Every structure is written in structure tokens, then in C-alpha cells.
Image (tube, helix red, strand yellow):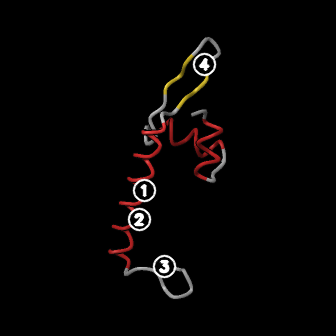
Amino acid sequence: MRLEDVAEELSVNMPQVRSLVRSGELPAIKVGGRGVWRVERSELEAYIERQYVATREGLKQDGGITSDGSR
């Protein structure tokens, strides 16, 4: 997937995706002569799963979500 596709899938902007790649949170490779960045779908799915786990742990520690949707 191109980084643009990842941004769309996660509903975030390109700088946020680039930050995830730079930090190593979202593994990506640079391919081709023009240096296009790609993320394998399996890596994106693994990143999303890690976010679900982190969110669950955070909710356990913070006491969950209130009826109005806030923490």
C-alpha cells in the first residue's frame, strides 16, 4: 500500500503516517528508483491490532468510557 492509502485507511493525514514510519511504529519499505514508500497490508493490520490492545489496556487503567463517550 502507498502511504496515501494508509492515511486514508487510518483516517489520518500524511504527516501522521510519515511520523509512524519514521518512528518504526509502522514498518515500511522504500521501493523503486523514485523512492516510493510502501506498507504491506499485514504490517498495517498488525499496527491496528497493537492499537486495539493499547486502547484496551488504557481503558482498563482509566476506568473505561463514560456514557457521553469521554474517558
Residue at image mark 3? 71
Q: Which mark is residue 55?
A: 2
Residue neighbourhood size for the residue with mark 1, other residues' Cα within 10 Å, grouped as few (<14), some (14–19), many (≥20): few
- Please indicate whether residue 14 sits to the left or right of residue 70 in the image: right
Q: Residue furthest top?
A: 33
Residue 62 at x, y percent in the picture: 38, 77
Q: Secondary structure at mark 2?
A: helix
Under mark 1, the amino acid is: Gln
Check disc 4 and report the residue beneath it: 35
Q: Nearer the viewer, residue 43 or 20?
A: 43
Q: CA distance from mark 3 to mark 2?
A: 11 Å
Instruction: Work out whether mark 3 precedes mark 2 in sequence or the reverse, and give the earlier one.
Output: 2
The percent coordinates of residue 31 (x first, y second) are 55, 18
Q: Position of residue 2 (x, y in %)?
A: 61, 33
**Dot 2 crowding, Cα within 10 Å, few <14, some 14–19, many 20+:** few
| Tag shown at residue 51 | 1
